[in-house]
């Protein structure tokens, strides 16, 4: 096939961000710099992953347990630190909040000028790390509201509508970065020899309906009846195919391109499910809505949910409009 990076007109990520604004306003330049930093984090993480099995001390557990009560992997710590270190040099970000940190991380030297906050999940699908399977990173950028003199980051407890950019990096056979700034969804592929993310597809639209349903059916016994009924409906209906990788970034990427629905519902012991609103569900919801899809808890749009704490969890049903609506109708009407 043709090599897109050989094309003289190949679009790099930073050029694309600037083109979206059609001006060189301070905001356009900030966003371009911020996306560049995220891309750099992605490149550093991808590079380490590609050598992981060849190096000592890269894979496996650290022996610690994080705020979520999950065992921490060495790769989680590495990726979490990569985002901090690339944003230390940005001057633009004062606070970072991630799955791996109990409280937001402040970069004091950036705080007088750092008008943006980064919310992120450094490694999505951690259970895939030690088996050389697909992984992701999820990110969202918000504008800081108020001066946060108390240092409690209370302004982060706002709904997903406040995100100004969001997306994910997918570490698969190639590394991809998919992002939105509220003007459509665009994907880029890393050319490792150039060290650049090159535009792959612009204005991606998710199909209104698709064959994929993606859910951990091992949890069937602890779901409530409407979710069980939905899955029974899928089992007796022609045209569905199951795909579940253990990393929702890769499952949702497939659904973005081919259509379908990803679910992580609540369970009887954990009605809020597993996924965290601020740095997992809300960024993906923003992106999928921008592609023409839908994301809901079953009762409320994900982007409308107002969190009461940083690591708040929500049920997540996300994907093609019709397929998400079908799940919602089981939850709300029982069929
Ligand atoms: P993580 O960020 O700790 O890896 O958790 C998020 C992941 C999702 O990527 C994935 O869909 C889900 O957790 C898998 O959980 P489970 O093993 O319960 O199905
Ligand atoms: Mg995660």
Image (cartoon, helix red, strand yellow):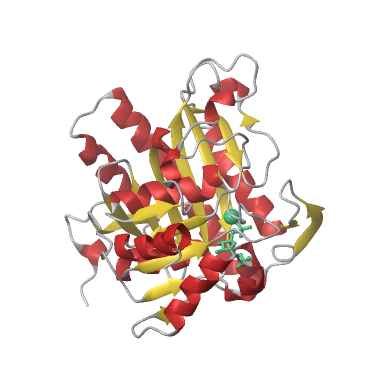
Q: Residue at x 67, y 60 (%)?
A: 268
Identify the residue at the far front of this view.
333
Horizontal relation, residue 20 to residue 95: left or right: left
Depth order, front residue of 36/296: 296
Q: Is residue 165 above or below residue 176?
A: above
Horizontal relation, residue 308 to residue 169: left or right: right
Horizontal relation, residue 190 to residue 76: left or right: left
Q: Residue at x 22, y 54 (%)?
A: 203
x, y percent for residue 59:
70, 66
- Tell me if I can see residue 191 in this picture: no
Q: Quadrant of the C terminus?
A: bottom left
Choose top left, top right, bottom left or bottom right for residue 213.
bottom left
Q: Quadrant of the N terminus?
A: bottom left
Q: Is residue 64 above or below residue 59?
A: above
Choose top left, top right, bottom left or bottom right for residue 228.
bottom right
Depth order, front residue of 275/87: 275
x, y percent for residue 183:
25, 43
Quarter of the displayed picture in which ligand 2 can be seen: bottom right
């Amino acid at each position: 096939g043709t090599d897109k990076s050989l094309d003289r007109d190949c679009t790099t990520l930073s050029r694309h961000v600037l083109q979206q604004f059609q001006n060189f306003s301070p905001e356009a330049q900030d966003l371009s710099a911020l996306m560049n930093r995220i891309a750099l984090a992605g490149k550093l993480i991808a590079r380490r992953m590609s050598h992981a099995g060849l190096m000592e001390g890269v894979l496996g557990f650290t022996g610690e347990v994080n705020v979520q009560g999950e065992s921490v992997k060495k790769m989680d710590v590495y990726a979490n630190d990569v985002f901090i270190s690339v944003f230390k040099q940005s001057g633009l970000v004062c606070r970072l909040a991630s799955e791996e940190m109990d409280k937001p991380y402040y970069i004091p030297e950036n705080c007088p000028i750092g008008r943006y906050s980064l919310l992120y999940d450094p490694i999505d699908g951690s259970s895939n790390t030690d088996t050389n399977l697909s992984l992701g990173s999820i990110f969202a950028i918000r504008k800081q509201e108020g001066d946060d003199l108390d240092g409690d980051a209370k302004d982060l407890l706002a709904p997903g509508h406040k995100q100004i950019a969001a997306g994910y990096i997918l570490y698969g056979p190639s590394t991809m970065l998919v992002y939105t700034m509220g003007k459509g969804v665009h994907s880029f592929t890393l050319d490792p020899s150039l060290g650049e993310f090159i535009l792959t597809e612009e204005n991606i639209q998710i199909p209104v309906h698709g064959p994929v349903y993606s859910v951990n059916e091992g949890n069937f016994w602890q779901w409530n009846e409407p979710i069980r009924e939905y899955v029974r409906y899928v089992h007796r209906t022609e045209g569905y195919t199951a795909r579940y990788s253990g990393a929702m970034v890769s499952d949702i990427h497939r659904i973005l391109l081919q259509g379908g629905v990803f679910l992580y519902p609540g369970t009887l012991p954990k009605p809020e499910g597993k996924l965290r609103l601020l740095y997992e569900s809300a960024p993906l919801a923003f992106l999928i809505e921008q592609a023409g899809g839908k994301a809901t808890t079953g009762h409320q749009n994900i982007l409308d949910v107002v969190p009461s704490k940083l690591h708040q969890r929500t049920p997540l049903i996300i994907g093609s409009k019709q397929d998400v609506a079908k799940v919602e109708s089981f939850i709300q009407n029982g069929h």
